[in-house]
Image: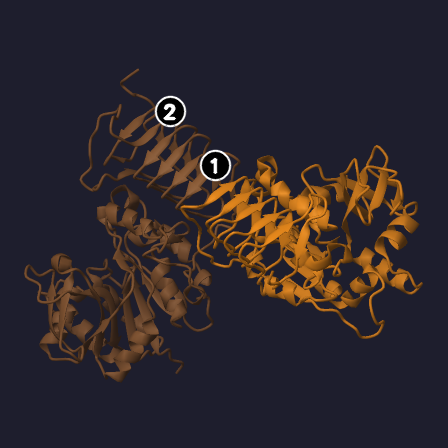
Chain colours: A orange, B brown
């Protein structure tokens, strides 16, 4: 798919993720013990053979730039093409009102890519695929736009969603955006494939008429005039849109059938390498049903947890159903249940933090409890 | 001319024959170590952490895996515009091409490589040891003393001294005697095989040594004694800390065990001195609801359903339900199947230990042929070997071929 330009919209600091997106955009949110959410989309693109990826950012993008660096970890530090993080461009139109403004602000980059196709995505999803079959379908259908969707019988929890209805050829015949009651279980994944020149034309057409939103102003308005097709993704999709979904996506990593699909298949998931030491389990360690990254020292009881890199868990602690991010320190005698600890949190001796399954306690980055 | 102050030459051509089946297809420096590393990661990371980014890696024995592993040198931050990591195999020169005949000859053959960087100093290392050392400090000592040669030394127990090259130095560290594996050692300062030479001097001696037909072209046996004989300024640089030659099956096992314990002898938890390695990009390891792990080191990609105690598991190793791994090291991507028992063993890469099989058994059901390289009760299973269900492999055996059945007690 090297004739395709990948554009990953880094997104805003989603309000729904609260403390977790205070210091970072959604794409830079840590998941699954050693990854950031953007790793999955970026790896999917690289594994599809896409060699040129742009990531337009809006706010708080330092954390994301820090993670992506020059793109070497994804094999994208190239002379030709490669990875570029595109900081917000504030000249002209002021703050972006919609995704079309963001795309317009990188129009030169899009044009200069000289690729035939453009794949536009978000970075709030955990899944492992390649886009080759989608491109095949796009060509076969002679589509103007192909939208990747998945089947989600219950989408009532989704904060925003685009529901689709397709005919037997997978052509999209109806669309609803954020309906109160879902009208379809076919939910767009916000992944759009089209020709670059088509995008350039419609960007110009929309913005000159004061329209700003891809889904509303292109998909919905033009669904009858354009050939817009769906492409169903049938595998596992973890969508992160609020604290509860962030929690459950992480807990999905304790299901071997899901981690098998994500990590044991043909296509690897790339991430920044930190060269941490393997994790050491002490004499007092009692770990069950957990995913643990490297660089940890574990001496306590840990059950149903996701433990990120460099976490230290001292003697006499009991940690259950929790997510502990990088470099946090849990001192002796602490009890945690249903807690999410952001990076570099210290929980002092004998403290207790207990949340509820549908409402975990979230402790912000660098907090001392 | 662009010049680099200090170029490192890493001798990585050794076979490591006392590691038996582990070095059948790879050179010793490529042998896995410590969960996610290979032996060569230690000297390479030491170089990177010491700010030495120009490293020639001299290969000879089975270099292919090592070549791929080092690649552009990127994992050690050695993908540089000037300098970087270079794999240097022996090469043909007109009609006179030849193998590296000894450690000194290997550097001699690469004089043109070194000259390209116009260095003042050359650091000679071996790819056989596990240690964390700041070569910059050694280089500073070399400069301060105005030395021609500085040799890193390590205090070994007096009773072991006759296994090493032993230096005798005065109170200023000036070396006045050197003996390779002496019967009656005069000191317990062993050479670590880490040398800093002022390049002009080394160059002269390498050329002279090459012309000497009686020389065996070895640093310890020929070049160092010749320099000492000529009264050069040679200083010992005392290294304190962990240093181990992992040249035997037992020492490799023991050195891995040194990573464990409340206060491990070999502590790699050091943010200022990370050991870098090429990363397989695997997710965090998974511990199942019935697993039990104590006093062990576990890394990315492992899946643990059984019991693991006092062991080191490498990337992607799997211990299935009801299996027990104790006092052992399990190399990358090996699988210990349901109900199997592994004790005091080294399981090499991509092995499969069948259901209810026993590795390290006192009551084997296959002919118990101990291998002289497997000492101290260590059993070694070579790369890609499959051990069938219910087979019991006796202690101190070295298994190089699949044993799929033939247990003689059914």
Q: x and y percent of residue A135 in the render? A: 72, 45
**Which mark sits nearer the N-terminus, 1 or 2?**
1
Which chain is disc 2 placed on?
B
Is A58 placed above or below A287 here?
Answer: below
Q: Residue furthest top?
A: B410
Q: x and y percent of residue A35 in the render? A: 59, 53
Is B124 placed above or below B278 here?
Answer: below
Question: On the rendered structure, is B110 left or right of A19?
Answer: left
Is A124 placed above or below B44 here?
Answer: above
Please tell me which residue is depicted at 70% across the width and 56% down the height of the picture. Answer: A6
Which chain is disc 1 placed on?
B
User: In this orientation, which residue lies closer to the viewer: A84 or B19?
Assistant: B19
As drawn, the label of residue A290 is none
Question: On the rendered structure, is B90 left or right of A17?
Answer: left
> The C terminus of chain B appears in which quarter of the rendering?
top left
User: Dot 1: within a 10 Å radius of its alpha carbon, few (fewer than 14), some, or many (20 or more) residues?
Assistant: many
Residue A126 in sight in this render? no
Please tell me which residue is depicted at 49% across the width and 39% down the height of the picture. Answer: B303
Mark 1 — residue?
B291
Mark 2 — residue?
B389
Q: Quadrant of residue B127?
A: bottom left
Question: On the rendered structure, is A287 left or right of B228?
Answer: right
């Amino acid at each position: 798919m090297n004739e395709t330009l990948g554009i990953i919209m880094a997104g805003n600091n989603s309000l729904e993720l609260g403390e977790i997106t205070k210091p970072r955009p959604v794409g830079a949110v840590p998941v699954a013990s050693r990854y950031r959410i953007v790793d999955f989309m970026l790896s999917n693109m690289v594994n599809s053979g896409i060699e040129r990826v742009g990531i337009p950012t809006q706010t708080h993008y330092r954390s994301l730039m820090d993670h992506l660096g020059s793109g070497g970890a994804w094999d994208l530090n190239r002379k030709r093409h490669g990875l570029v993080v595109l900081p917000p461009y504030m000249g002209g139109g002021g703050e972006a009102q919609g995704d079309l403004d963001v795309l317009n602000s990188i129009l030169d980059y899009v044009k200069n890519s000289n690729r035939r196709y453009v794949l536009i995505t978000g970075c709030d999803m955990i899944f492992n695929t390649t886009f080759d079959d989608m491109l095949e379908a796009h060509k076969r259908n002679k589509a103007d736009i192909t939208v990747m969707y998945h089947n989600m019988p219950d989408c009532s929890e989704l904060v925003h969603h685009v529901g689709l209805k397709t005919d037997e050829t997978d052509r999209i015949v109806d669309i609803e955006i954020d309906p109160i009651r879902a009208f379809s279980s076919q939910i767009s994944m916000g992944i759009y494939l089209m020709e670059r020149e088509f995008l350039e034309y419609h960007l110009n057409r929309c913005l000159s008429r004061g329209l700003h939103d891809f889904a509303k102003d292109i998909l919905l308005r033009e669904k009858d005039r354009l050939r817009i097709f769906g492409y169903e993704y049938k595998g596992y999709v973890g969508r992160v849109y609020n604290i509860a979904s962030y929690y459950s996506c992480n807990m999905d990593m304790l299901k071997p059938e899901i981690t098998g699909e994500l990590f044991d298949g043909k296509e690897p998931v790339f991430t920044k390498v930190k060269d941490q030491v393997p994790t050491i389990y002490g004499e007092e360690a009692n770990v069950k049903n957990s995913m643990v990254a490297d660089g940890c020292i574990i001496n306590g009881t840990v059950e149903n947890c996701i433990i990120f890199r460099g976490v230290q868990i001292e003697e006499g602690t009991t940690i259950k159903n929790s997510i502990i991010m990088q470099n946090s320190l849990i001192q002796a005698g602490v009890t945690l249940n249903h807690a999410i600890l952001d990076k570099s949190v210290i929980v002092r001796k004998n403290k207790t933090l207990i949340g509820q399954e549908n409402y975990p306690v979230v402790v912000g980055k660098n907090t001392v409890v | 001319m662009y010049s680099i102050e200090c170029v490192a030459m890493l001798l990585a051509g050794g076979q490591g024959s006392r590691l038996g089946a582990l070095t059948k297809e790879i050179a010793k420096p490529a042998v896995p170590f410590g969960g996610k590393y290979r032996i060569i990661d230690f000297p390479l990371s030491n170089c990177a952490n010491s700010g030495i980014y120009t490293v020639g890696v001299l290969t000879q024995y089975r270099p292919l895996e090592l070549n791929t592993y080092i690649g552009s040198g990127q994992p050690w931050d050695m993908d540089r515009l000037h300098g970087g990591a270079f794999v240097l195999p022996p090469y043909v020169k007109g009609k006179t091409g030849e193998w590296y005949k000894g450690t000194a000859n290997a550097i001699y053959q690469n004089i043109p490589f070194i000259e390209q960087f116009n260095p003042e100093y050359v650091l000679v290392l071996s790819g056989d040891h596990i240690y964390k050392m700041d070569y910059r400090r050694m280089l500073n000592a070399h400069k301060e003393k105005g030395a021609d040669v500085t040799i890193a030394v390590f205090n070994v127990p007096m009773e072991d001294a006759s296994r090493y090259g032993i230096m005798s130095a005065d109170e200023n560290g000036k070396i006045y005697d050197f003996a390779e594996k002496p019967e009656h050692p005069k000191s317990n300062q062993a050479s670590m095989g880490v040398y800093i030479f002022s390049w002009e001097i080394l160059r002269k001696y390498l050329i002279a040594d090459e012309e000497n037909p009686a020389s065996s072209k070895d640093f310890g046996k020929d070049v160092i004694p010749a320099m000492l004989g000529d009264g050069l300024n040679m200083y010992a640089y005392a290294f304190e800390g962990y240093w181990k030659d992992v040249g035997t099956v037992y020492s490799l096992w023991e050195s891995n065990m040194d990573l464990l314990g409340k206060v491990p002898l070999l502590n790699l938890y050091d943010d200022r001195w990370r050991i870098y390695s090429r990363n397989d990009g695997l997710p965090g390891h998974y511990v199942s609801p019935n697993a039990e792990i104590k006093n062990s080191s576990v890394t990315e990609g492992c899946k643990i359903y059984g019991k693991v105690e006092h062991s080191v598991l490498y990337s992607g190793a799997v211990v299935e339900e009801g299996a027990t791994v104790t006092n052992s090291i399990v190399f990358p991507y090996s699988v210990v199947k349901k109900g199997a028992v592994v004790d005091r063993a080294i399981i090499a890469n991509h092995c499969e230990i069948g259901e209810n099989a026993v590795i390290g058994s006192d009551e084997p059901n296959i002919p118990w042929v101990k291998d002289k390289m497997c000492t101290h009760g260590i059993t070694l299973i070579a790369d890609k070997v499959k051990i069938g269900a219910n087979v019991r492999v006796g202690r101190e055996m070295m298994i190089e071929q699949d044993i799929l059945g033939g247990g003689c007690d059914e």
